[in-house]
Image (tube, coloured by chain):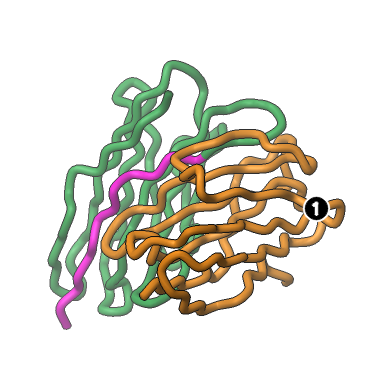
Amino acid sequence: AQSVSQHNHHVILSEAASLELGCNYSYGGTVNLFWYVQYPGQHLQLLLKYFSGDPLVKGIKGFEAEFIKSKFSFNLRKPSVQWSDTAEYFCAVAPFSGGYQKVTFGTGTKLQVIP
Amino acid sequence: AAGVIQSPRHLIKEKRETATLKCYPIPRHDTVYWYQQGPGQDPQFLISFYEKMQSDKGSIPDRFSAQQFSDYHSELNMSSLELGDSALYFCATSPGGRTYEQYFGPGTRLTVT
């Protein structure tokens, strides 16, 4: 079974600081990788996803993530955070399989951006 | 664009009562997933359906059951509710096949008193 670990549980940054959230997964086969964001009081929204191809994936709102297969990592980055980025961020992995997928989530990282 | 619809958005029940949560997928999505997110916790996978058949089962209590109907909507039935069942219940849907991303609904907030 796959698992996901997010190393930082709570991150506090000032506006304009750069962000990098760590995500490592364990699974023996090919995977699809995701980052979701949950703004306070809202539902999960997809930020970006990696299926195949270019390991540097660009998502919405200036976020990007890099898939490093040798390190089983899929870290999320943003060069300059804004107060509106305050939210909880979940890394997720799904095995590449036909028909359906089961997504396993990490425990989440709460990001607080201070104006 | 159409999104995943969940109803009701909020539900308050008493202990030992039953509750039914509904999920209506995005058009042409044939796969439905249910998640439970407790306060301050990450979403936990409960159960999924693909083409109206149960495809995977996670940490779903025996008191809960779910099904997917011919129009691909799904219902999560919860009986003998406990205080610990208070949570946000997300439904996600995906088109199955080669695309593997899930689109989440807004969730149903269940409060058990």
Which region of the structure is painted magenta? A103-115
Q: For this view, does B49 lie left or right of residue A21?
A: right
Q: For this view, does B53 lie left or right of residue A66?
A: right
Q: Position of residue A95 (x, y in %)?
A: 53, 28
Q: Residue B73, relative to residue B30: is it above or below?
A: below
Q: Say which quarter of the image contains residue B38.
A: bottom left
Q: Position of residue A44 (x, y in %)?
A: 46, 63
Chain for colour orange:
B
- The amino acid type, in three-letter code, at marker 1 is Phe
Q: Secondary structure at mark 1?
A: loop
Q: Residues within 10 Å of mark 1 (few under 14, many from 20)?
A: few
Magenta region, mostly helix, strand or loop?
strand
* Image quarter in which the C terminus of chain B is found: bottom left
Residue drawn at x 72%, y 60% is B25
Q: Nearer the viewer, residue A41 or B76?
A: B76
Residue drawn at x 68%, y 37% is B54
> Which chain letter matches label 1?
B
Q: Residue A8, relative to residue A12: is it above or below?
A: above
Chain for colour green:
A
Residue wearing tag 1: B69
Residue drawn at x 34%, y 31% is A25
Q: Say which quarter of the image contains residue B106.
A: bottom right
